[in-house]
Image: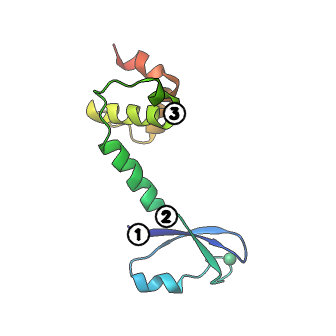
Amino acid sequence: MPIYEYRCNQCRKEFNELILNPREINKVKCRYCNSRNLTKLVSSFSVHQTEAARLANFDTSKPRGDDFYKDSRNVGLWAKKRMKEMGVDLGPKMDEIVEKGRTGKILDEYDK
Ligand SMILES: [Zn+2]
């Protein structure tokens, strides 16, 4: 879904707009003060896409070197992918699990 994030240059507040019709983009007004003086931010939609793509391209069977673990985002990503492969659906608890993955504790629990 095309969700756009805006920052109002008038009142400095940020808000999301769901835009179904591309023509609506020029009609977007600040939700708080109706100003049209807006700055478009990175859409949350594309951020999720990127993570999904990273996840899909990720191969957990390949050995990971020190460089890999220097990027904490990769550790969380690995944990998520691993969960998916094991068919574990943790829902809202996923963030907690990922956090464990970042600290290495997840290995203690799932290598048994
Ligand atoms: Zn505003």
Q: Nearer the viewer, residue 55 or 86?
A: 55
Residue 1 point in image, percent of width and height = 38, 67
104 in relation to 41, above or below: above
Q: Give the image location of residue 52, x and y in percent.
A: 36, 49
Contact between marks 3 and 2 (CB within 8 A): the answer is no
Disc 1, disc 2: CB below 8 Å? yes
Sequence-wise, the earlier of marks 1 and 3 is 1
Residue that lies at the very extreme toward the right in this rendered image: 11
- Residue 84 x/y as whole percent: 30, 36
Quadrant of the image containing the C terminus: top left
Report the disc number at residue 2. Answer: 1
Label 3 SS: helix
Q: State ligand 1's quadrant.
A: bottom right
Residue 5 % position (x, y): 54, 67
- Residue under label 3, please give it: 72
Between the residue at mark 1 and the residue at mark 2, the CA separation in whole angstroms equals 8 Å
Q: List the residue tagged with mark 2.
A: 43
Front-most of residues 73 and 24: 73
Residue drawn where x is 41% and y is 48% of the image: 51
